[in-house]
Image: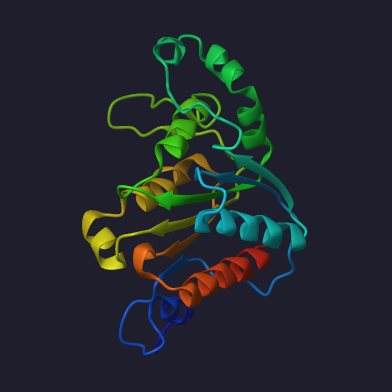
Amino acid sequence: RRSASRRRFCRSGAALRDRSGTGPARFWLSGSASSHPITPMRLLVVFSHPDPDSFNSALCRTACEALREAGHEVRLLDLYREGFDPVFSAAEKASYLPDTARNIEGVAAHVEALRWAEGWVAVYPTWFYGLPAMLKGWLDRVWLPGVAFTVATGRQRRIGGELRNIRLFVGITTSGSPWWWLKVIGDPGRSLLMKGLRPLYARGCRMKWLQLFDMNHVGADERAAFLARVRRELAALRG
């Protein structure tokens, strides 16, 4: 007899197969919608794409609309539009640990937004198997010691978490590669956001992942279906 957890796993795993039931779908979804009442949250959406007419821009608009319509308080950081500088300078490296307050001062508005949030949503294209340089630079410059983490206390120890305010993370991305190839190489971008950063968040932080594969070969119907999936999943998010 299957356990309740096994039955839940099987139901969620159905989302990983196509309609024929014989192969993986183009959607990769971690997490599931809940029938529990939605409690409004403070959510930070971080968007990284240079083209305002891109499909990723449509994903960002859809995500923000769905979250606001569900009653959540949303702040949007459009990194390209605001001209965020992703370059981690030599001066920043020099003060990174000895005078972290100086680094924090240089990106104070972004640090405040990160500390304000109860959850955050990353919307970006997967390029060369990972995050765009703009988004990676945002992590490098904003997720500082004392803001996002504490430095490991010794050898063979991992960093500690400072973002205990974060109770939810959602990753939304597109990739030109097929699902199977990303699986072979370890899907570096997804691994960073879903595994590497998780210890920095609140205990029990909920993680959700939505990805459209084979982006260079999908048609309008598949793009529309993915937009609908993003809207549906985000509209169901609860606090």
Residue 165 x/y as whole percent: 63, 41
The residue lying at 57 percent from left, 66 percent from top is: 230
Residue 197 falls in which quadrant of the image? top left
* Residue 11 vertical position relative to residue 56 in the rendered view, above or below: below
Residue 234 falls in which quadrant of the image? bottom right
Q: What sort of colour scheme is used for the picture?
A: rainbow
Of 172 and 61, which appears nearest the observer?
Answer: 61
Of 80 and 24, which appears nearest the observer?
Answer: 80
Point out the image quarter for the N terminus: bottom left
* Residue 79 vertical position relative to residue 55 in the rendered view, above or below: above
The residue lying at 61 percent from left, 16 percent from top is: 105
Tell me how many marks there are.
0
Of 239 and 234, which appears nearest the observer?
Answer: 234
* Residue 26 vertical position relative to residue 149 in the rendered view, above or below: below
Residue 188 x/y as whole percent: 31, 49
Farthest residue in the left direction? 184
| Residue 213 showing in the rendered view | no
The residue lying at 47 percent from left, 34 percent from top is: 139
| Residue 233 showing in the rendered view | yes
Residue 95 x/y as whole percent: 46, 10
Is 138 situated left or right of 16 in this image? right
Point out the image quarter for the C terminus: bottom right
Is 33 situated left or right of 131 in this image? right
The residue lying at 71 percent from left, 48 percent from top is: 74
Residue 196 x/y as whole percent: 39, 44
